[in-house]
Amino acid sequence: MNNRHFVFLSALIVVSFFALVRVKIYGQDLQTNIQKMELQRVNLKSELQAMRAEWAYLSRNERLVELNQNYLKLSKISSKQIMSLDEKKASESAMQPTTNVEWRFKSRQNILKVKH
């Protein structure tokens, strides 16, 4: 009887030892992952800071005005360019095509039919 108890307790101690080692290694892996993630967070934070500084530099008002003058040549909106919605709808209806165009979908192909 004592021999069985000794074998059982010995096996229990060995299994407990391996379980404890496994838990310790798992904890160390988690700690390593936490350190890697913290380092990655710090790196991303510094990249974000650099990108915000670049954006602030690139979106300066003086620079945008210079780019506009050199490439776009945009001007301020005049009152002649502003119209009411009724005027907009009237101008769109005047620009409608004279023929009716109908799209039909048939067997994954677009078929354009013109009605006269």
Image: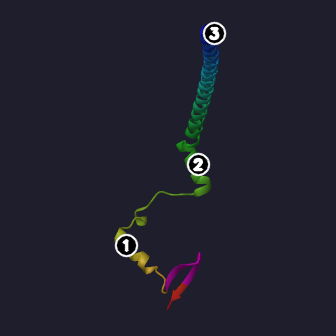
- Disc number for residue 87: 1
**Residue 90 drawn above or below residue 7:** below
Q: Amino acid at mark 1?
A: Glu
In this view, the mark in front (1 or 3): 3
Eyeballing the image, is 12 above or below 42? above
Which residue occupies the foreground of this view, 47 or 29? 29
The residue at which mark 2 appears reads as 66
Query: Foreground mark, 1 or 2?
Result: 1
Magenta part of the protein: which range?
Answer: 100-112
Residue reaching furthest front? 1
Q: Earlier in the sequence, mark 1 or mark 3?
A: 3
Relative placement, left or right, of 84 versus 57 is left
Q: Which residue is mark 3?
A: 3
Q: Alpha carbon of mark 1 to alpha carbon of mark 2: how far?
A: 35 Å
| Residue in the picture at 63% in, 24% down | 29
User: What amino acid is found at the position of numbered circle 2 in the picture?
Assistant: Glu
In the image, 88 versus 78, the foreground residue is 88
Q: Residues within 10 Å of mark 1 (few under 14, many from 20)?
A: few
Instruction: Please tell me whether mark 2 sits on a helix, a strand or a loop.
Output: helix
Q: Position of residue 57 (x, y in %)?
A: 58, 38
Residue 113: x, y in percent? 54, 85
* Residues at discs 1 and 2 in contact (Cβ within 8 Å): no
Question: Within the magenta stretch, is there residue 14?
Answer: no
The local secondary structure at tag 3 comes to helix
Residue drawn at 60 percent across, 7 percent down: 2
The residue shown at (57%, 32%) is 49
